[in-house]
Amino acid sequence: MKIGGGYGNIARRISDERATENVKSSDQATQATFRQLPPVDYPYETSGYPRFTEGARYWLQWAGIPDSIYSESQGKNDYTDDYKSRGMWVNYLAGGSSANPTEKGLNIPIDLSLAFHTDAGTTFNDSIIGTLGIFHTEPYDGVYANGTSRYMARDLTDLIQSYIVDDIRTLYDPNWSRRGMWNQSYFEARVPRVPAMLLELLSHQNFADMRYGLDPRFRFTVSRSIYKGMLRFLSSQYNTEYVVQPLPVDHMNLCFLGENEVELTWQPVEDPLEPTAKADKYIVYTRIGEGAFDKGTLVDRPSYRTSIPAGVVCSFKITAVNKGGESFPSEILSAAKALNEKGTVLVINGFNRISAPADFDFQADSTAGFLDLVDHGVPYLNDISYIGRMKEFRRQIPWMDDDASGFGDSYANYETMVIAGNTFDYPSVHGSAILKAGYSFVSCSDEVVKNGAVSLEPYAVVDLILGKECQTKMGPGTLLPLTYKTFDKEMQKAITSYCQSGGNIFISGAYVGTDLWDNWLAESDPKDQTFATEVLKYKWRVNQAAVTGQVKSVASPFRTLTGNYAYFNELNPESYVVESPDAIEPAAEGAYTVFRYSENNLSAGIAYQGDYKTCVLGFPFESVKTPAGREQLMKAILSFFQDK
């Protein structure tokens, strides 16, 4: 509902009566003293917040909706106006249409209304509060404006809640609680003149629920479940068959066929929860240089060939389509043909992770919470809901008011910021620097390397992007295997073979050492450590190695590896944050530290020269702040590989 850019421009002022109600102190004497103060003419002021963070009441006023809809209180109580305006807005949209013929409005035939809530209380243990559905059948003599029974809302509620609970139980947690369905007089269930559901998905105050609720994978699943429930409801109302949109494709590969011709291939992904969600066709979107993606090309099969201009980075993403619609986009692969090329680099996109922040649960002292200073997690594309890191970890501390919220209380210094996450667009970032250094490049998903569909041997250099990839849990971490390992057995096999053939490999990531030696979620495997020390020639020293985001080159036999660099070490809207870079050290003869963190001289990167060459960084290359910095660093690394 809150669609629209910019900052809020609705100026409001607080009356003395409402100011009295907002006194935070529970001290009755303080409140009495406040009431005795002389009246104050409070100035009008805007919120100072982005519009997407403001309430519905302000958005509706900004959008030009009548004041009878957005302010039933006639400007006296913005709080009640906010939740009441939502259901009244639905009726206004549908007014005059077949869905609501008895009221005036915009004549839009609204089929249903969903109010999405997460306010359901707290437990002092690890119990899931779970999902509740609310509808109301009694108002308006039990019928909607078009004469149909209000029990349609019960059907809608049952379908959506069933999809949510069944999908969560199947994919994540078999004990997810279905709290039932309430036929009760909640405003957003009572007022709409079309079938309406009030969904209490989970409790944002409850730690066990939010272990799931902060995870982008869980959010995608739940959003898709709600969509499927709505789709089933509409198909039953209109007596038509339904088809669910496909899932995004994977196993992508982009390679050269000729001088300037490339071929893009991929695989569709089956949905284990929905048999109709099969891809019929695909849309390939193309981006030339730093421009926008085009409108797409529809293709019948999972492959696409095209010519690309020389000397410019060309990027591609894919969506799967069927009668139900278009999938979310795939990751983005890129390629470029250099003029007078020095060779061709294969860029492997191994950064697939999206996840909730790190968390802990100490039963002994009844403390728990999220530790985003250790690992902020990785949002999908970006996050608009993060307000600040958690500061109250004691479960027993109660909510007193919104300024002292008890267990889970957080700082609010990021309320107005959009936080960058995984854009899945890093082959273009690496590739731009590779092209500047005089090399052509192509790219692929890590899956096609692991399954053997793409061989590393033909390429002069391999660049493996690991970003913030590391073994990650879902929810409490006790029910599902960990995902997003930096180097699984298949990737280790492919890299080992490439190195033994005399290849040159560049690897960068924040957890290249920690994930193999000291991931607190996983038991370390000596075989993984042997791969790192004997093949890639580095060993882990410590995680959380630096905080200032500064790296400097140091003296080594490899004189091309020079320069000072800055990476994104704080939350920002441009790049995911690197809050816990790794310190890694040389592990073999012929390997040397080539970069150190400026504040403490811990080793930030190593290079090795023997029968083959490796360069491994404990911070992600794409997190370097400036294009000039990335170009300088990539040129230094490629020069090291080229230098005989």
Image (cartoon, helix red, strand yellow):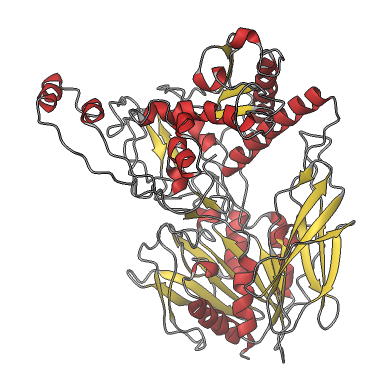
Percent x, y for residue 644?
A: 63, 91
Instruction: Pick the quarter of the image with the N terminus.
Output: top right
Say if residue 108 shows up in the picture. yes
Compared to 490, does 412 lie above or below? above
Q: Quadrant of residue 241?
A: top right
- Residue drawn where x is 85% and y is 76% of the image: 257
Q: In x, y percent, where is residue 436?
A: 61, 84
Who's the residue at 53% across and 52% down the image?
A: 382
Q: Point out the residue furthest to the right here.
A: 300
Residue 357 position within the rendered picture, expressed as x and y whole percent measured from the top left: 48, 45
How many numbered callouts? 0
Name above or below for residue 392 compared with residue 287: above
> To which quarter of the image does residue 615 belong?
bottom right
Q: Position of residue 393 (x, y in %)?
A: 34, 35
239 left or right of 148 in image: right
Identity of the residue drawn at 42% across and 30% down? 71
Q: Work out whether residue 14 or residue 160 is closer to the camera in this orientation and state it.
A: 14
Q: Is residue 544 above or below residue 184?
A: below
Q: Nearer the viewer, residue 639 or 353?
A: 353
Q: Residue at x 60, y 22 (%)?
A: 197
Using the image as rendered, state which of residue 411 and residue 630 is in the foreground.
Answer: 411
Is residue 378 visible from the viewing direction of this image?
Answer: no
